Amino acid sequence: MIFKNINLTYKKEVFKDFEINIKENGFNFIIGESGVGKTSLLNIIKNRLLESNKKVSYVFQEDRLIPWITVEKNLELILKDRKEIEKLLIEMNLKDVLEKYPYELSGGMKKRINIARAILYDGDIFLMDEPFNGLDRDNKKNIIELIKKKAKGKTCIIITHNKEEIKAFKGIFIEIYGNPVKIKYNS
């Protein structure tokens, strides 16, 4: 899956005729220094996928939960099947959170709810922007295994700064750097 002619300018040129090749049906990791344009690139990819009518599951850096409704209601916006929601939350070590409001959750719990929402949506393609930040070691390990299982056979693009996460997935990583951005592929 190749995304071509990516151009983006803020106060400076970020992407100029940029091209990125994404391995389909596998895990792709985008790494690079803070501020190089990783999230912007992921958003451009998301927009192009949506324009081509692809079903996209997206894990944002921030949780983006609706604060005035419970976790259950937040997840029911994606899937109405309470049993399926409960089953997934148990797998994610979030057994008793359905009736809680986002303000009652820790940052790591909100992050896992964000990931649960993407899994429940079950897109053809998963885009994840630093999905494991704020998770303790045991929860991170559990969530990585869960994503490997739930997204198996799908195309996944994950932004991270952590090469240990890449090793856990046995994915390829794509390093972006420079101004305008350049690319280097690694496996």
Image (cartoon, helix red, strand yellow):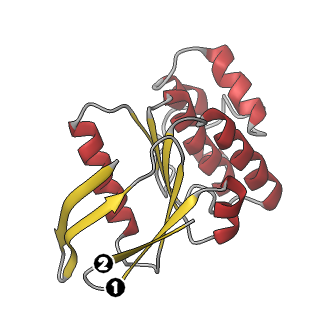
What number is the disc on residue 181? 2
Residue sitting at x 37%, y 78%: 36
Q: Amino acid at mark 1?
A: Gly
Give the answer, above or below, for where 169 lies relative to 87. below
Under circle 2, the secondary element is loop
Q: Label 1: few (<14), some or many (≥20) within 10 Å?
A: few
> Which residue in the structure is indicated by mark 1?
178
Residue sitting at x 48%, y 37%: 68
Distance from disc 1 to disc 2, alpha carbons, whole Å, reads: 5 Å
Left or right of 112 in this view: 25:
left
Q: Amino acid at mark 2?
A: Val
Q: Nearer the viewer, residue 78 or 105?
A: 78
Residue 106, visible in the rendered structure: no
Outermost residue to the right: 138
Q: Are marks 1 and 2 in contact (CB under 8 Å)?
A: yes
Q: Nearer the viewer, residue 66 or 131?
A: 131
Residue 63, visible in the rendered structure: yes
What number is the disc on residue 165? none
Left or right of 17 in this view: 68:
right
> What percent of the width, then of the height, locates residue 66?
46, 40
> What percent of the width, then of the height, locates residue 107?
64, 56
Residue sitting at x 50%, y 46%: 156
Under circle 1, the secondary element is loop
> What percent of the width, then of the height, locates residue 20?
33, 61
Left or right of 184 in this view: 16:
left
Residue sitting at x 27%, y 54%: 3
Q: Label 2: few (<14), some or many (≥20) within 10 Å?
A: some
